[in-house]
Amino acid sequence: MKAVIMAGGEGTRLRPLSLGRPKPMTPLLGRPVMEHIISLLKRHGVTDICVTLCYQPQAVTDYFGSGERLGVRLTYFVEEEPLGTAGSVKNCMSHLGREDFLVISGDCVCDLDLSRLAAFHREKKAAATLALYSHSAPLEYGLVVTDPTGRVERFVEKPAWGQVVTDRINTGIYLLSPSAMDRVPDRGSFDFGKDLFPALLREGAPLYGCPLEGYWCDMGDCRAYLNCVCDALDGTIKLEPGLPRRGPGIWSAGALPPGVFLTPPCWIGPGAVIGAGAKLGPWAVVGRGAEVGSKAVLRRSVLLEGASAGPGAALSGAILCPGAAAGQGAVLKEGAVLGENALAQERAVLLERVRLWPGQTAPAGCRLARSVTSGSQKGTLRFGDGGVIRGVLGEDLGPAALRARGSGVGAEGRVGLGCSATPGAKMLARAAAAGVAAAGGQTWFHGLECPVQGAWAARKEELPVSLFVEREEGGPVYLHFFDRQGLPLGRARERKLEHALLQGEFPRVRGDRVGELEQLRLSALLWAQSVAREAALGRSVLRRVTVAVGKDSPTDRAIRGALLALGCQVEDRWRPGIPAFSGSRGGFRLSAQDERGALLDSGQLLALVALIEMENGSGTVAVPSGASAAVDLVAAGYGGTVLRLDRDGEEARDRYAALPWLWSAPSAAARICARMGTSGQKLETLMSKTPRFNIWKREVPLSSDRGRVMQALAREQPQAAQGEGIRVRTGSGWVYLVPLARRPALRVMAEGPDLELAAELCDFYADRAAALDREACRQCVQDKDKK
């Protein structure tokens, strides 16, 4: 049997312990949590394992490699964007084949009997079997109600005590058949708990729950992590300590140091230094290279690699991340956490649940009752792919960070500003407005609710720079910056802003020159009418087009409004015979279903919009560097020209800005519906006119400089088109290679008339990039040796 380990999580609730690493890489008794999961799978005979990755994938691939060191075979699948739990597993089906397989989270801690789960699954001939666990505190989990045979009757999500009809929770461990996975769409986000299992239940498919004995813990936050450590030390969970046992409940890499008082259980890693008179335990972990000063006290506490507790320090229920230090006489109480390289100076007292984020300091002699995060640090956030800054509210994005960014753009005079309708987004927007005012700029605020509308406001008012703060409740924060054309700022302006923030160059003016806040008289209706007028192809719609668009998200509400203004009849749900549209990425990405339910991604729809543009008499379109080669074939059929951003300069940028349906999901949906209305054709008919390419993607982690690898690839492909990446034409296929902004990796996307060719091209260029990366690393070492 094969297995899938889902290891794409960021672990936001586990911060600051998880900052700088994926959650499955959190250390537990000297090894990442995911390594304990691999050991569990291996004990039950599972050695062929797929690993789904999203957040910082290189941290996982660098540590585990091929899996040979652990006696298993690991195959990695990296998500370019979140696909949901079921969607990420669907992405692995090319490797899993048509046999039943196991799914398990890479960040849970458990020793459940997976062999019993597999036997139960086979006995019931189930489409899907959920591993269930009787939990003493079930309120925070999804409950699963089964009949006496184990067949699932219903789910109860995050129940109140009055709904706790069972204590059996869904552990997130599943045995699945390929037939169950056939219900998961090939594209888009799709979850096991929210989508697949409810669908199986409605259909009456054989969906079962199997209760298992043993230990299971979600390890969702720092408190749960500390509980897991204690349970591992006292044997509540069966984990391999990985160190020699030096006495009852005492594991140590070396001989026990003299003059130290140990109360079992304790775990002391390689290279740890413990001063005379120190008192450790019960439940004390001193990681590799960590230091405990003389007469320090550690009870129910964890010092990770390289952390230190100074002489006389007292830690009770505390966690010190790698490189963190508690100074002489410092006191850390229950739930206190020091992030990586954080410092509690001499005699500092951190009260219950106080946390210092990485690099932060608690001053000497202070009594700290509130956590100190990195929100006030300058220069820690950079623009990512697509010109968007991403962060977490209250951690790396707070009011201070927004004030700094507001000041950074305020010197340009007029600054557009908008935000989502959530309290957090509004608070950050107010902070940005304060920064603009402090720099002498005028803030022009609009009440539009999604970023794509903010881009329209910037274009309509010709604002030099605009900011839209996007945040759904409980989610990350996205900062969208636009120029006067409504497009992202461009890399040159982004770098200038990053440099100013890094240097702390925040413009300030005298009190009599402070800027003011103005309200733009814009509305969602005015925006929708403008979008409809632009997209209407200059003719009235000949027939009333019926489409489906949801209304749960700001982006979908925007698409809905634009299509209503165009004269479409808009329904809430897709049904056979009508198309459906949906937006994402702040309204800059469109997806659809045609009348038969076939899913259409943004690349296919961009090719269709280009086709409509060519049919309408326009000879030139502009598209992003990574847009599908289908656009080139469409243009070639009409003798047209395709400009690519970051390759064709200002001409491409101006053309791109002038055709908003090339980058705005509501405008693209309106343009497509306008063509359907004037031609009387269905969406599936229009799509049949566009070339169909199969796409295969891979991500190659890089150890050397990204620039060196790209330069080497460019030298090998002198005829390739270069811009933001390299586009290579090879026979009947295309390959696009581009470095990622957020992490040291290269994305390889290959297109071909069939999937086999696309996969072959993708693998060839990915392997070549990896080889060039290794050569660059070797050259780097040789250069250092010469010096």
Image (spheres, rainbow, N blue to C red):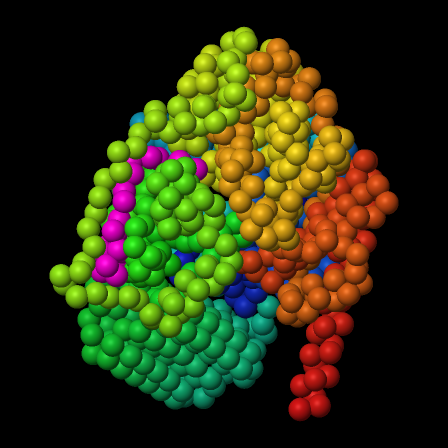
Q: Above or below — where is 465 with respect to 172? A: below
Image side of residue 159 versus residue 155, left or right = left
| Outermost residue to the left | 512
Q: In the picture, residue 597 is in which quadrant?
A: top right
Q: Residue at x 37, y 44 (%)?
A: 462
Query: What residue occupies the far right of the structure in this picture?
Result: 731
In this rendering, is residue 573 above or below 663? above
Look at the image and give the residue range highlighted in magenta.
433-453
Q: Nearer the viewer, residue 750 or 372?
A: 750
Q: Is residue 157 above or below residue 311?
A: above
Q: Is residue 594 above or below residue 130?
A: above
The stretch drawn in magenta includes residue 84: no
Instruction: Name the spot of residue 426 as percent of width and height, x first.
Output: 27, 44
**Who is closer to the viewer here, 343 or 117?**
343
Question: Quick check: 273 left or right of 472?
Answer: right
User: Is there any visible trace of residue 425 in the rendered image?
Assistant: no
Residue at the (73%, 78%) spot, across then down: 779
Q: Position of residue 474 (x, y in %)?
A: 37, 43
Please indicate, yes or no, whether residue 387 appears anywhere in the rendered image.
yes
Q: Quadrant of the N terminus?
A: top right
Q: Quadrant of the C terminus?
A: bottom right
Out of 356 and 768, give the one closest to the viewer.
768
Residue placed most toward the observer, 344 or 138? 344
Q: Position of residue 63 (x, y in %)?
A: 63, 64
Q: Quadrant of residue 509?
A: bottom left
Which residue shows up at 64% across the image and 27% down it?
617
Residue projecting furthest to the top: 543
Q: Position of residue 469 (x, y in %)?
A: 36, 46
